[in-house]
Image: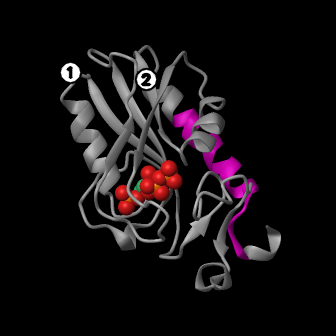
Amino acid sequence: MQGDIEEILVSREVLNERIRELGKRISQDYAGKDLVLVGVLKGGFVFLADLMREITIPVDMDFISVSSYGNSTKTSGIVRLIKDIDINIAGKHVLIVEDLVDTGLTLKHLKELFNTRGPLSVKICTALDKPSRRKVEIDIDYEGIEIPDKFVIGYGLDYAGKYRNLPDVCTLSPKVYMD
Ligand code: PRP
């Protein structure tokens, strides 16, 4: 697996430091409020697991599963709902927790979906942001680290289902997808 990595783009140390800051901000901003963290599967589960342990207020959590990439390195633009949340979010504050915002299509779709269910607010937290790739305008309320337009793997992000277990955010060696 190590031979398939081109370079480490964001190290686990840098990620951890940023996640600590985000957890602190979220804990302050939502103090006394009914907060539901919604992790976006599959990639978002690693970030959600780290982020929730840096949040010091009581929170509820759930997962939603969507897919737009399939086995390709390019988004199809179509967001497919695979698994919905179980929690009723009416009257609650929702924070969507993502690993990466690329075109923004996934989050735009999820925000619109959750807003039809009567929440008090729907905000977005992402570990990584690729603003240069944006196709739709989307407000990111809690941003981890901005990255350049490179295909990245690790920290929950995959290529053809693999590499999610790398602890750092890495670029994939072109030889892997040129073969
Ligand atoms: C990735 C990522 C985001 C989405 C971002 O998920 O985890 O959910 O793409 O892209 P966008 O801003 O262009 O919509 P993917 O569809 O690869 O699913 P996965 O997390 O199950 O790998």
Number of residues whose C-alpha sits closer than 10 Å to that of mark 2, classed few (under 14), some (14–19) or many (20 or more): many
Image-based side of 23 in relation to 68, left or right? right
Residue 129 - label: none
Identify residue for label 2. Answer: 36
Image-based side of 153 in relation to 67, left or right? right
Q: Which contiguous range is marked in magenta?
A: 5-25
Q: Is residue 104 magenta?
A: no
- Residue 57: x and y in percent read 55, 18
Q: Is residue 16 magenta?
A: yes
Tell me if residue 100 can be seen: no
- Residue 91: x and y in percent read 27, 15
Q: Is residue 100 above or below residue 41?
A: below
Q: Earlier in the sequence, mark 2 or mark 1?
A: 2
Identify residue for label 1. Answer: 118
What secondary structure characterizes most of the magenta part? helix
Locate residue 114: give its quadrant. Answer: top left
- Residue 53: x and y in percent read 66, 29
Locate residue 44: give its quadrant. Answer: top right
For the view shown, which residue lies furthest in the left direction? Answer: 116
Which amino acid lies under the numbered mark 2 shown in the image of this protein?
A: Val
Q: Is residue 68 above or below residue 173?
A: above
Number of residues whose C-alpha sits closer than 10 Å to that of mark 1, classed few (under 14), some (14–19) or many (20 or more): some
